[in-house]
Image (spheres, rainbow, N blue to C red):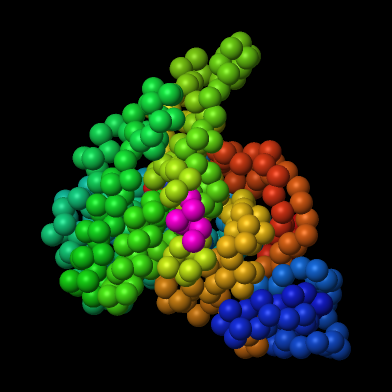
């Protein structure tokens, strides 16, 4: 099938192209980008007023499959990704069983192929069963095709073991995706340590819970030469340390999630229990809206501003979602008992556009860099580029449409978002993977 995308604003960081043009897709590949392409096509798309960008690449997704299919499956997760404009996603290994050997890697890759929507790259765990005791079969998983390892959900607290993993990663040429959280320092915290936590009577998580491991992991990357990518950075000092590390030529990159650059801990809503408990909808022990509970937690205004400026100044390289679906039942309890995590695949693009592009922090070109081009470079993928000859992984994004986010329209099984009902600007109109339309509004 041939597709002709007409009159869109083509934004392609790899070539620096940023102009109105037509894009011709033939046999799964971009064959031509020019003004006024005359060729016949099976499908003509009017993209006037829309951005035509390389399909988004999410370095941080929880597909929950195998083992937690009530929260999400590879199919529903891929559908959510396509809906969000993503053409490639990296799946985190904290499933059941944990992805710590080639068999589970193959299971995910085969199932994703059968689903046939977006490219799924499984990430391998650092340690067996994510127990932090001995290394997983990293070589075996690399042979099965993992582009990265991660202990996401926690940090490997044994620095010597983590150092050995980094040495392996450096030798094998894969990147280490680091969840930075000092386990002992969390001490039962469920939200940011601040005045609002005290008002709600909830235990706090200090910035140092993250910062201490960010510092440690940067040192280990410096010592081993491993490529280190810091997941879901949430603090101002994380940004400062990434900046310093880059100045010292440490091979570090970093990601920020939309919730961390959009919301602060003060946005955590107190539920009015009297209404909903009567209807038996909200659990009797509910004390605040657990759709605002994620790890790391929502921080302060100061941190949010540092993350925005860090993205603007290209200290922070990537916008990822940390899409972490949970069921209503999982979340329908107190802040203390609810699991950490919120969905993100279907709200990342509009939040990035609204908060950062319209907010004056990023250009549309930088949006394409952080959501596609940089992730491809960091992971080492021949993607994130829609120049002629490249695979046709494309997103068409309308930057003019303003609407309210509606969680009931999500393709994800997860409805655990703090953004339901929020007014945003910018909508994914179409997602094309390898020349196939996998989502169309
Ligand atoms: N971010 C979260 O709050 N939760 C993630 C784990 C993680 O990314 O650390 C999950 O798997 O639910
Ligand atoms: Zn994490
Ligand atoms: Zn995660």
Q: Residue at x 23, y 75 (%)?
A: 225
Above/below status of 46 relative to 321: below
Residue drawn at (40%, 30%), measured in percent from left and top? 195
Left of 23 or right of it: where is 280?
left
**Residue drawn 29% across the image and 57% down it:** 214
Magenta stretch, main secondary structure, is helix
Q: Could you say which quadrant of the image residue 334 lies in? A: top left
Residue 412 visible (yes or no): yes
Where does the image place residue 28, in percent across and percent down from the top left?
Answer: 66, 79
147 vs 130: above or below: below
In-front residue for pair 249/333: 249
**Residue 109 lies within the magenta run:** no
Q: Quadrant of the N terminus?
A: bottom right
Is 190 situated above or below 165?
above
User: Is residue 435 found left or right of 75 in the rendered image?
Assistant: right
x and y percentages locating residue 361 in the rendered image: 58, 62
Q: Position of residue 217 (x, y in %)?
A: 25, 61
**Image position, residue 279 (x, y; %):** 63, 14
308 in the magenta segment: yes
Q: Please give the range of residues in magenta.
A: 304-309
């Amino acid at each position: 099938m041939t597709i002709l995308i007409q009159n869109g604003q083509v934004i392609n960081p790899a070539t620096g192209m940023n102009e109105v043009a037509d894009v011709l897709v033939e046999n799964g590949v971009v064959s031509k980008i020019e003004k006024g392409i005359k060729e016949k096509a099976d499908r003509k798309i009017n993209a006037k007023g829309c951005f035509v960008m390389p399909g988004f690449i999410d370095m941080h997704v929880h597909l929950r499959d195998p083992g937690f299919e009530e929260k999400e499956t590879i199919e529903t997760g891929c559908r959510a990704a396509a809906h969000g404009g993503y053409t490639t996603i990296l799946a985190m290994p904290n499933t059941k069983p944990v992805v710590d050997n080639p068999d589970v890697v193959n299971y995910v890759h085969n199932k994703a192929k059968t689903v046939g929507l977006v490219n799924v790259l499984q990430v391998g765990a650092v340690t067996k069963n994510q127990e932090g005791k001995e290394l997983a079969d990293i070589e075996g998983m690399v042979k099965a095709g993992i582009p990265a390892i991660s202990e996401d959900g926690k940090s490997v607290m044994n620095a010597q073991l983590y150092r050995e993993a980094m040495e392996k990663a450096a030798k094998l040429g894969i990147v280490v995706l680091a969840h930075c959280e000092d386990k002992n320092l969390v001490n039962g915290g469920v939200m940011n340590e601040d005045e609002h936590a005290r008002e709600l009577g909830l235990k706090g998580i200090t910035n140092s819970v993250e910062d201490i491991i960010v510092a440690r992991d940067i040192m280990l990357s410096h010592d081993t030469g491993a490529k280190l990518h810091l997941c879901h950075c949430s603090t101002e000092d994380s940004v400062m340390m990434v900046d310093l590390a880059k100045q010292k030529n440490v091979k570090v990159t970093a990601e920020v999630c939309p919730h961390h650059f959009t919301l602060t801990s003060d946005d955590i809503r107190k539920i009015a229990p009297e209404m909903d408990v009567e209807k038996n909808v909200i659990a009797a022990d509910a004390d605040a809206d657990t759709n605002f509970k994620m790890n790391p937690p929502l921080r302060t205004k100061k941190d949010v501003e540092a993350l925005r400026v860090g993205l603007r100044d290209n200290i922070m390289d990537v916008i990822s979602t940390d899409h972490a679906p949970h069921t209503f039942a999982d979340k329908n309890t107190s802040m203390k008992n609810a699991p950490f995590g919120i969905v993100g695949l279907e709200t990342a693009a509009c939040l990035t556009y609204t908060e950062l592009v319209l907010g004056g922090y990023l250009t549309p070109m930088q949006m394409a860099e952080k959501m596609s081009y940089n992730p491809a470079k960091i992971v080492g993928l021949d993607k994130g580029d829609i120049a002629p000859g490249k695979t046709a992984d494309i997103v068409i994004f309308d930057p003019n449409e303003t609407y309210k986010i509606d969680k009931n329209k999500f393709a994800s099984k997860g409805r655990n978002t703090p953004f339901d009902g929020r007014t945003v600007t910018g909508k994914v109109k179409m997602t094309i993977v390898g020349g196939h339309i996998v989502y169309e509004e």
